[in-house]
Amino acid sequence: MTQRPEPLWPLFAELTTLDGVGPKTAQALEGMDIVAPRDLLFTLPHGVIDRRPRASVQDADLPGVVTVEVTVGRHMKPAQRGRPYRIHVEDAQTGFQLVFFHGRSDYLSRVLPEGARRLVSGRVELFDGMAQMVHPDHILPPDEAATLPQFEPVYPLTSGVTQKLMARASADALARAPELGEWIDGPLKAREGWPDWRDAVARAHAPEGADDLAPSAKARARLAYDELMAHQLTLALARVNRRKGKGRVTQGDGALRRRVLAALPFRPTGAQMRAMDEIATDMAAPQKMNRLLQGDVGAGKTLVAFMALLIAVEAGGQGVMMAPTEILARQHLEGLQPLAESAGVVVELLTGRDKGSERKAKLAALARGDIQVLLGTHAVFQADVVFDDLRLAIVDEQHRFGVRQRLELGRKGAGADVLVMTATPIPRSLALAQYGDMDVSVLDEKPPGRKPIRTALVSSERMEEVVAHLQRAVSEGRQAYWVCPLVEESESVDLTAAEDRFKHLRAALGEGVVGLVHGQMPPAEKDAAMAKFVAGDTQVLVATTVIEVGVNVPNASIMVIERAEWFGLAQLHQLRGRVGRGEAESTCLLMYRPPLNDAGMKRLTTLRETEDGFRISEVDLEMRGAGDLIGTAQSGLPRFRVADLEHQAGLMAMAQSDARKLLADDPTLESPRGQAARMLLWLMRQDEAIRLISVG
């Protein structure tokens, strides 16, 4: 099964074998990601033109496309160059004009001879009370009326590709589409009322009105489901394959965990307890754990992660936790050190800074098993880092970790369980697209003691008021972040923005009160500036967005975000989550430069109204779309041609359970439905999945 099945060959032939497609057109189509006839099948029309004939332009909705039979009247040739050529015509009820710019009279008198009957179709507009059809799209003798489709699909185009060509090439691709076996679960298909695959493709290319273009139209929903199903089948195969890899049973006696819980000043939330149980159950099973821990800002992921690491230690093994940056790795260490001490567990930090003899000593201790929990940056995956008995690897993900890196991670410890943490609440449909191969635990409650953060919108014209407010807060011993926007195009610009703001605040608040950190600084300086702020030596930290991830300064209770309208919703939510971690009431000021456009207004008011990261991510998805939300290029998120994750979120969850059920019933895909599913994987170019089947 490593060769494409024969029924699909015509769909994967050269583009130039299609009707009307030469080498130049083929090249233009490649610019639209169309490289085979199959791709045309999944490039669906995004509009439809109603060409049904009507009696007269008089009762039509103008401006709009009208198809009407007329008697051709007088030709009015232009008196001077550059003026349009007009032809008066009469339909059953009224007269109007056909208008041609640069019209050639010999051609027009041949196609539209005076006194003849013609069917004309095109856009009609009123001009000075007179209806005009400028450059009709179609002019036909009445006896050829049947050749005009009643509804004409409108395709996406690129330069060098016309509607006519797309229609011809698509029709040819459709003619090659074979009847295929059914890969969708029978009862599901019946319940949704979906057509067969070939029928669905044909219907999607022949819409009869706006309803047929909606994501909810039966033919489109079916094709979207096919795409999502192929994607989820690939993820489910990867999951099954990973579970075949022998994991290890890791069970603890709970002694260390009890000590830590007893030392905590509060009880964990219900969501935290539930996640801890799910993780403990996974680790105790003989298969490898592959779980995603998803939690909102401040939902207490670190505690859950540490409890999981303690299970590894209780079982006599080791755990490793990897953070995306050194600052974060250090923060994990600071946060976990007191807990580790209460349990008597040895925790150590390894980053790119460890050099020479110090590094050697750490590696030796790790290999002997003296270090029980290792925290660090990706330095923990270098070849010379050897564990005595690695049971659990935790990745604090921040989107920089795709499916591929997860696989590499699992190879470090022979049967190590893997837990991935993400602090970015992702709408369910996207979480399934990106993490569909994983089991998911969600932390959706705030731990006790987290106070709500007051969020306000302030125009940048009130800058001086804000600075005065800051002055009062600083004199009361409070700390504040002041975030300046990052100007992508030019790092020198955002540098000056941050530096100017730093100078301005330093002049207002006094020397030694204000610190500065930005992306252009050498890491050591950046860390030093952060450290001073964490220690409370500086009270205001002016920063570009380098602080959004994980920084924890409980005394910081004010967050000012300048030009907030430039930031994405998720980013603003992450930044706001840096305050509200201590005893004081916290405030987040979103400063914007008026006038705000609608989108900017919606983003900032959404943020003012809710602190629920999952709600915020849903609004973000509606506003920006899936690709932008997690940056398609780096996210490992698949590009779907038909499926629309904003409007078809429900289909993704259906596809996941359907794919998992199919593989549970038929692990080798040998049944008739299994064979059809293999065909689907070939059709959708899921090479990774095909490799997994042939290996399996």
Image: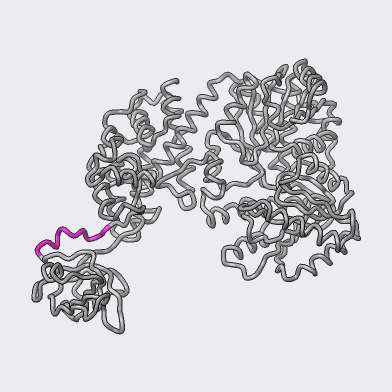
Left or right of residue 611: residue 133: left
Left or right of residue 424: residue 89: left
- Quarter the N terminus occupies: top left
Left or right of residue 161: residue 398: right
User: Residue at the spot x=54%, y=53% of the render?
Assistant: 621
Q: Position of residue 100 (x, y in %)?
A: 23, 72
Q: Quadrant of residue 146?
A: bottom left
Camera-side residue: 431 or 189?
431
Q: Position of residue 617 (x, y in %)?
A: 59, 52
Q: Position of residue 282 (x, y in %)?
A: 63, 28
- Quarter the C terminus occupies: top left
Q: Is residue 195 magenta?
A: no
Look at the image and give the residue range highlighted in magenta. Answer: 143-152
User: Residue at the spot x=76%, y=40% of the render?
Assistant: 523
- From this viewpoint, which residue is outermost toward the bottom? 129
Camera-side residue: 696 or 412?
412
Left or right of residue 76: residue 553: right
Q: Is residue 151 magenta?
A: yes
Q: Position of residue 138 (x, y in %)?
A: 20, 64
- From this viewpoint, which residue is outermost toward the front? 81
Question: What color scheme is it?
Answer: one colour
Q: Quadrant of residue 299?
A: top right
User: Residue at the spot x=34%, y=46% of the render?
Assistant: 29
Q: Quadrant of residue 344?
A: top right
Q: Is residue 90 above or below residue 536?
A: below
Can residue 643 be seen from the camera position used here?
yes
Count of marks placed on residues: 0
Can residue 303 be seen from the camera position used here?
no
Camera-side residue: 316 or 38?
38
